[in-house]
Amino acid sequence: MDNNPKTTANCEKWCRHEVAGVVTEVGSKVEKFKVGDKVGVGCLVDSCCTYQNYDDNLENYCPQYTLTYGAKYRDGTITYGGYSNSMVADEHFVIRIPDSLALDATAPLICVGITVYSPLRYYGLDKPDLHVGVVGLGGLGHMAVKFAKAFGAKVIVISTSPSKKDEAIQHLGADSFLLNRDQDQMQGTMGALDGIIDTVSAVHPLLPLIGLLKSHGKIVMVDAPERPLELPVFPLLAAKHNVKPDIEVIPMDYVNTAMERLLKEDVKYRFVIDIGNTLKV
């Protein structure tokens, strides 16, 4: 592994694309790790490294990158991810695992953990006392609840399964539970949430969820339904707060007078001509 920034690690605890292990060999240009370090690797092991995305830690937007599994290294070797005895990765894509964390519990954090942690931080949903909804309570959802609670948020789990209520509140520490098939519960939560992390992979309606958001609230989808989701736009244009201009309705034969008043700035704040009722043909 000479003259390169690559790190080789034994894959001790793994899934296909969430890998935790111990460094067994380092290239001559590796600066961040040494043999024996506990490390983890996510879904990328390399990228072109020549674009601004790399410097901004947005390598997944690079035009050329190497996936942890099912891809090819630059030398043509196939990547097998966590299903291999060892793997090679550029040190930029390797993270250090503290000695206090067990490898088996850490590996999933590199996938489901970062998938929900990142949007909570990026969209400002990591502040104490914000109201954050988590849709779905599976692998992604339970981590979203844990991270949001760790940030100090008030967390409401939104689910179609009543059986998830005890798990959400008693085990994971959510503040409340919303059964999204209960219209009374949904109506009572309208406009209450600062943000929603939607972790459901099945096709589901978005409009009822958007209705739970405050103005400028954020909904972030972190799973991938197999079919396109429908989002009717027109209901999003509703006059929720009754914001409208101050107007003076005038007949068609008053237009000349209205123009004179405009010159005198004698209008608050718009003239509206009633064409239908006053225009004589």
Image (cartoon, helix red, strand yellow):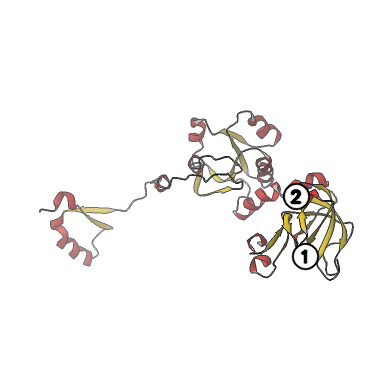
**Residue 44 seen anywhere in this rendered image of the structure:** no
- The nearer-to-camera label among 2 and 1 is 1
Between 194 and 13, the residue placed more toward the observer is: 13
Please state if 277 lies on the left or on the right of 111 as rendered. left
Q: Secondary structure at mark 2?
A: loop
The quarter holding residue 259 reads bottom left
Residue corresponding to mark 2: 18
Residue 230 x %, y %? 48, 44
Position of 60 relative to 150 (above/below): below
Q: Which mark is residue 11?
A: none
Residue 232 x %, y %? 44, 45
Label 1, residues with CA under 10 Å away: few <14, some 14-19, many ≥20 = few
Which residue in the rendered view is the most extreme toward the left? Answer: 281
Position of 179 relative to 3 (above/below): above
**Residue 173 seen anywhere in this rendered image of the structure:** yes
Q: How many marks?
A: 2
Q: CA distance from mark 2 to mark 1?
A: 23 Å
**Residue at 63% over, 28% down:** 163
Whichever of labels 2 and 1 marks the residue nearer the N terminus, that label is: 2
Which residue in the rendered view is the most extreme toward the top? Answer: 163
Kind of residue indicated by mark 1:
Asp
Please state if 91 lies on the left or on the right of 116 as rendered. right
Residue corresponding to mark 1: 75
Residue 164 x %, y %? 64, 31
**Residue at 79% over, 44% down:** 105
**Residue at 13% over, 53% down:** 279
Which residue in the rendered view is the most extreme toward the front? Answer: 76
The quarter holding residue 159 reads top right
Kind of residue indicated by mark 2:
Glu
Screen quadrant of the N terminus: bottom right
